[in-house]
Image: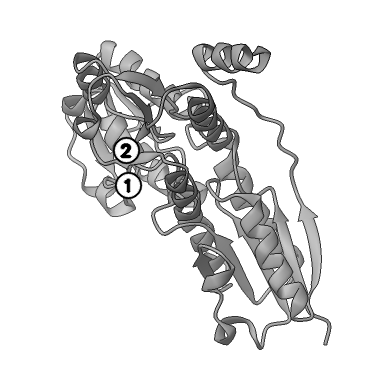
Amino acid sequence: MDKTLFLIGPRGWCAGVERAIGILNAALENLPSPIYVRREIVHNKNVVNFYRSRGVIFVSEISEVPAGRTAIFSAHGIAPSVAMEARERGINIIDATCPLVTKVHFEVQRFVKKGYTVLYIGHRNHEEAAGVLGEAPEKIRIIETEEEARILNLPSSKIIILTQTTLSVDDTNKIIDVLKKRFPRVELPPKEDICYATTNRQLAVKTLIAKHPIELLYVIGSKNSSNSNRLCEVAETLGVPSRLIDGQSNIKPKDWEDKALIGLTAGASAPESLVQEVAKFFKAHGYNVQETIFEREDVTFALPKELSELAAAHGKR
């Protein structure tokens, strides 16, 4: 029996994560140590542990950063109050928020100024949602499920729907459909908020499952990675069992030993090195490793100007 491991593309780091990691690397190379990061720079245990080994100090709150030090805000964004506290304490701020998350923050600001109530589809306990809520907590209602959308009581006539960038495309559309039926005049932004990388990775999983009868999907990503969990859910919805793993060490023989066709992808915070480790593992166990790329991505985000200039100056020394 031929055994195949399909490497699904696109996968792994998105442009926002690439930018956040680039910011952290530039700070380590060009600024005095230690560098502090509020929360995890990206939601991946292996990445965080790597930078912790390089001396980066990860903190839960900005109050843990000594005055005068450098603090990086993670890719998930922060509430305005966090930035205000950092400035008041004389902390050197570097914002690694993904530009696509920043876009949602700007949308909240713009629509709230126009008198809108914001219906934000997202996960209440996720850092991205907490940051967006901090823009105007009295004007934002967070909705997680279709049921919450069905029972929502809202007197406002001016309503806009915004979303977390890392949600399930299908589940989000179901919630939006409920809200449209309940509030016929509800509006949506000109361009959807779920980011290109989340959409592409979910579509790639769907496309592979439609083309090949895979029996199991591995998703490399940490438990607190929203987009990684959504990839697992996409597979499960289509009848394919899935496993969320941090890397090769989490692979359990009982899951794959009787499977001939397996899919492998990675959430937007997981580095390609982890994918290759898993591919090497399965190749050693007799699997043909087949690259299957359904979409090419060429999105990039520039580093903050001050870091780019520091890096350039450092390179000339």
Front-most of residues 6 and 53: 53
> Circle 2 sits in a helix, a strand or a loop, which is it?
helix
Disc 1 residue type (three-letter) = His
Q: Secondary structure at mark 1?
A: loop
At x 35%, y 20%, the residue is 93
Q: Is residue 168 visible?
A: no
Residue 164: horizontal and vertical position, in percent? 40, 38
Query: CB of mark 2 within 8 Å of CB of mark 1?
Result: yes
Instruction: Name the residue type under label 2.
Output: Ala
Q: Which residue is mark 2?
A: 129
Q: Which mark is residue 123?
A: 1
Q: Is residue 82 above or below residue 317?
A: below
Depth check: give the residue in front, 122 or 265.
265
Q: Would residue 261 be seen by someone viewing this image from the given angle?
A: yes
Q: Locate residue 145 relative to residue 52 in the image: left or right.
A: left
Q: From this viewpoint, which residue is outermost toward the front?
A: 317
